[in-house]
Image (tube, rainbow, N blue to C red):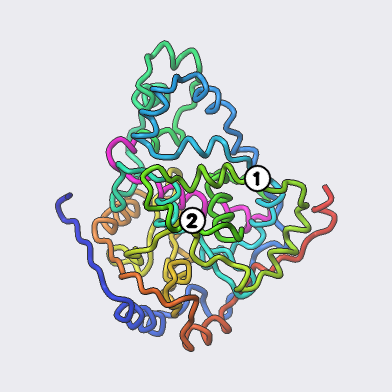
């Protein structure tokens, strides 16, 4: 355990008192008089998520090499087999709320959490409290790929083009016990934020993992809780093997998501066993996330029902202003602050209570500004 590491665990009641007091003293994420600057409809592309080159590398390996990779990196290769439904993804993006870093479907708030992505990726060697941070000097892509794959320099040179500073750096750090989840979430949130604010853009996060998470909450599937105790169980493999319709239009998806009710949501994904919940780090009132190209943050207390815990007012002040790029001035200091904060993780005990809310939460939720109610642009949808 690293020097200076601190992991504090509190019960649900103590966190509720702290969070609601913090919200009352510091205020909400949105300032009074806030006006939405989001476009009614966002044109978003997922062409960046074409994994053809990685599939070619994977298919060239023998079974022994593949098995070794699974042992070291969990179920990451399963992402290669997930087809990105571009119509669903485009519709889903319309409901992203940058102010709160979550999806908002009417009265339903949901967001991928650290614990959920850890469960999906099933990486046995990574440590939940060792978050990725971008190194000052980044070695060439080919050198990192040699370390990741264990293959020869000649093999790498024959199969891959020089790409410079890419997501391979994140991959390279996994063998040091570093969890990739905060970085994956950071870039997912940053990319969705950028597209929503600009009204268009290319999504550069992991669309495959985001859609796998989505299906885990919205597809009423056979309960699998008893199977998660099996050593060989993989939620990603099961999600990949599940056949789904791919002929639903973007407009139809938007209509479905607009009309979602609480009873339509599988609040806790059937493959997820909740225990202790990471709810803040260091002096941050929420969870800061350092990515590959920048930073973001999210507040797990906003979606406690995904852990089958009682929903109460989350501390959100400053959340909307926490995003920055590594091109911004002074970013290195901010990255160090996030890294230090992850050495002081704070968790709360899981408290099974069903999808219940406190009266205070209902009052706050009713007053909260939701600036992501999509108004589909019929002309855009037809293109």
Q: Is residue 63 above or below residue 119?
A: above
Q: Is residue 244 above or below residue 77?
A: below
Q: Which mark is residue 243?
A: 1
Q: Nearer the viewer, residue 77 or 198?
A: 77
* Residue 296 at least partly seen: no
Instruction: Determine whether the residue tagged by mark 2 lies in a helix, strand or loop.
Output: loop
User: Residue 194 in magenta?
Assistant: yes
Which residues lie in the magenta part?
Answer: 173-199
Percent across and percent down for residue 314 are: 43, 75
Instruction: Determine whether the residue tagged by mark 1 lies in a helix, strand or loop.
Output: loop
Identify which residue is drawn at 57% across, 42% down: 240
The number of discs equals 2
User: Which label sits in the foreground, 1 or 2?
Assistant: 2
Per the image, the residue denoted by label 2 is 224
> From the viewer's perspective, is 202 left or right of 298?
right
Q: Which mark is residue 374?
A: none
Percent across and percent down for residue 287 are: 38, 62
User: Residue 212 in magenta?
Assistant: no
N-terminal of the pair, mark 1 or mark 2, is: 2
Identify which residue is drawn at 58% across, 40% down: 82
Near mark 1 (Cα within 10 A), the count class, few <14, some 14-19 or many ≥20, is: few
> From the viewer's perspective, is 110 left or right of 179?
right
């Amino acid at each position: 355990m690293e020097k200076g590491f601190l992991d504090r665990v509190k019960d649900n009641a103590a966190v509720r008192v702290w969070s609601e007091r913090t919200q009352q003293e510091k205020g909400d994420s949105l300032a009074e008089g806030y006006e939405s600057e989001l476009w009614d409809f966002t044109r978003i592309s997922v062409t960046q998520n074409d994994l053809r080159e990685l599939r070619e590398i994977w298919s060239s390996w023998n079974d022994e090499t593949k098995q070794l990779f699974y042992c070291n990196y969990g179920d990451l290769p399963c992402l290669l087999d997930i087809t990105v439904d571009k119509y669903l993804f485009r519709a889903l993006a319309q409901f992203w709320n940058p102010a709160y870093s979550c999806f908002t479907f009417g009265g339903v708030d949901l967001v991928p959490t650290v614990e959920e992505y850890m469960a999906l990726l099933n990486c046995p060697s990574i440590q939940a409290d060792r978050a990725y941070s971008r190194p000052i000097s980044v070695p060439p892509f080919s050198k990192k790929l040699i370390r990741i794959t264990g293959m020869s320099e000649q093999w790498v040179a024959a199969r891959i083009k020089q790409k410079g500073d890419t997501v391979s750096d994140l991959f390279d750090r996994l063998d040091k016990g570093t969890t990739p989840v905060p970085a994956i979430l950071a870039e997912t949130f940053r990319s969705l934020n950028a597209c929503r604010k600009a009204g268009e853009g290319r999504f550069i996060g992991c669309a495959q993992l985001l859609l796998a998470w989505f299906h885990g909450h919205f597809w009423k599937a056979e309960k699998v809780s008893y199977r998660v105790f099996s050593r060989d169980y993989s939620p990603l493999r099961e999600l990949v093997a599940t056949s789904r319709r791919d002929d639903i239009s973007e407009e139809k998806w938007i209509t479905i998501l607009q009309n979602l009710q609480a009873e339509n949501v599988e609040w806790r994904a059937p493959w997820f066993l909740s225990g202790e919940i990471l709810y803040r780090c260091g002096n941050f009132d929420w969870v800061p996330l350092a990515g590959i190209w920048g930073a973001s943050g999210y507040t797990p207390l906003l979606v406690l029902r995904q852990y089958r815990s009682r929903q109460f007012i989350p501390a959100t002040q400053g959340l909307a202003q926490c995003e920055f790029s590594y091109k911004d001035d002074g970013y290195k200091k901010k990255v160090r602050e996030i890294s230090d904060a992850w050495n002081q993780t704070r968790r709360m005990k899981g408290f099974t209570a069903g999808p219940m809310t406190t009266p205070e939460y209902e009052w706050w939720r009713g007053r909260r500004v939701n600036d992501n109610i999509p108004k589909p642009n019929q002309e855009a949808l037809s293109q």
